[in-house]
Image: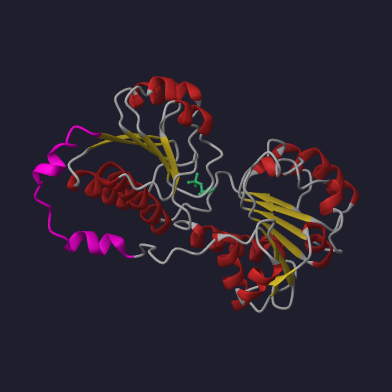
């Protein structure tokens, strides 16, 4: 749950200064390894350049599949890949079946619900994520969306301020902690709940006050920001009754996953409670229905939280380095299918 101290802001400058490595005999052993970056939503070019540099200096070959629209393109691209870097791209059993040489897949980001871990494990493929690498970007977007929401989507009408409002953070991991850090700068009163942390651990962070449970967070806070992963336990857990506990004028902000929301329940609640707002970076399946709540609903057209050059560089290069380290030393520190 710690924020990694090796975030690579400014890495591109460092890359330009580093001399090209001369391949050693040891590295030549791996020279036929192919690392595929498959991103339906591409990284910034500077991040791809950084990934390429890491891949090539280790003697591997980089293949790039960007903005693909047909899964068959992915099937073809993975056919001879030894390693795969993805973002929210779905790595299904079918993808794994087409990837006969695949040894490692790294989700360049935090949430790995897009990886079929069982299929990876069955084939002996190591699956990893890059925790913490894009969390500041997501947290900044959350705060930006909140300002947009309390200022009535910049429609000219008088809005309200974040200072002094109670912000509840649901799941106090890397993104949640960054949101807390920035929210304190806004003068917000920050609370948090995390099913995997004790109240003492949250309080000791000095960034948020722990509440007893999830329900208390919704009851006590003007704004609740979701940072839970999509798991069997969390799917549909943000429902009519829970969000209905929020005080008058409550705002729910989602930069996590759409699957955690019970959309039918939230739609029903927003019809009943005309004071509530729902702001999300993940367009709901029922986007058209939510749009009926004009002035109380906003969804980004494409998930934008991690879409910054810095986050792309941090997560993309971390993924490439983790692959190189795995091939060379067997390091599986960030493995998620143990
Ligand atoms: C994550 O889990 O890291 C974020 O949701 C970012 O996802 P993205 O790489 O698809 O933008």
Q: Residue at x 62, y 72 (%)?
A: 183
Report x, y in % for residue 34: 26, 33
Q: Residue at x 12, y 54 (%)?
A: 20
Q: Nearer the viewer, residue 326 or 5?
A: 326
| Quadrant of the snapshot with the N terminus | bottom right
- Look at the image and tell me whether residue 44 can be seen: no
- Look at the image and tell me whether residue 303 can be seen: yes
Report x, y in % for residue 26: 13, 43
Corner quadrant of residue 220: bottom right
Q: Is residue 190 left or right of residue 86?
A: right
Q: Residue at x 49, y 24 (%)?
A: 93
Residue extent of the magenta highlight: 10-33
Report x, y in % for residue 132: 48, 58
Q: Nearer the viewer, residue 139 or 199?
A: 199
Corner quadrant of residue 259: top right
- 254 versus 5 height, above or below: above
Corner quadrant of residue 55: top left
Q: Is residue 32 left or right of residue 47?
A: left
Q: Is residue 245 left or right of residue 320?
A: right
- 234 versus 93 height, above or below: below
Verify whether residue 246 appears in magenta. Answer: no
Report x, y in % for residue 297: 73, 51
How many tags in the picture? Answer: 0
Q: Residue at x 39, y 46 (%)?
A: 332
Verify whether residue 28 appears in magenta. Answer: yes
């Amino acid at each position: 749950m710690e924020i990694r101290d090796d975030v690579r802001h400014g890495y591109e400058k460092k890359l330009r200064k580093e001399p090209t490595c001369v391949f050693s005999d040891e590295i030549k052993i791996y020279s036929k390894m192919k690392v595929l970056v498959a991103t339906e939503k591409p990284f910034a070019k500077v991040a791809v350049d950084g990934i390429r540099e890491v891949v090539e200096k280790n003697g591997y070959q980089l293949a790039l599949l960007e903005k693909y629209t047909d899964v068959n393109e992915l099937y073809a691209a993975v056919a001879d890949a030894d390693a795969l870097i993805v973002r929210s791209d779905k790595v299904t059993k079918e993808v794994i079946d087409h990837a006969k040489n695949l040894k490692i897949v790294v989700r360049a980001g935090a949430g790995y619900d897009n990886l079929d871990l069982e299929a990876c494990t069955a084939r002996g493929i190591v699956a990893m994520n890059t925790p913490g690498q894009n969390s500041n970007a997501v947290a900044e977007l959350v705060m930006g969306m909140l300002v947009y929401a309390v200022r009535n989507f910049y429609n000219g009408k008088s809005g309200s301020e974040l200072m002094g409002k109670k912000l509840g953070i649901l799941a106090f991991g890397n993104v949640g902690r960054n949101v807390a850090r920035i929210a304190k700068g806004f003068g917000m009163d920050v609370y948090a709940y995390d099913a995997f942390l004790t109240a003492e651990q949250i309080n000791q962070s000095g960034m948020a006050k722990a509440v007893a449970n999830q329900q208390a967070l919704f009851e006590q806070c003007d704004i609740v920001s979701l940072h839970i992963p999509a798991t069997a336990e969390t799917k549909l857990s943000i429902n009519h009754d829970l969000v209905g506990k929020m005080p008058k004028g409550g705002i729910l902000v989602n930069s996590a996953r759409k699957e955690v929301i019970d959309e039918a329940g939230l739609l029903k609640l927003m019809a009943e409670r005309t004071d509530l707002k729902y702001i999300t970076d993940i367009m709901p399946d029922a986007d058209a229905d939510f749009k009926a709540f004009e002035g109380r609903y906003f969804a980004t057209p494409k998930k934008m939280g991690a879409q910054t050059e810095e986050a792309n560089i941090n997560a993309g290069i971390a993924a490439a380095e983790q692959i190189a380290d795995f091939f060379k030393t067997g390091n599986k520190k960030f493995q998620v299918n143990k």
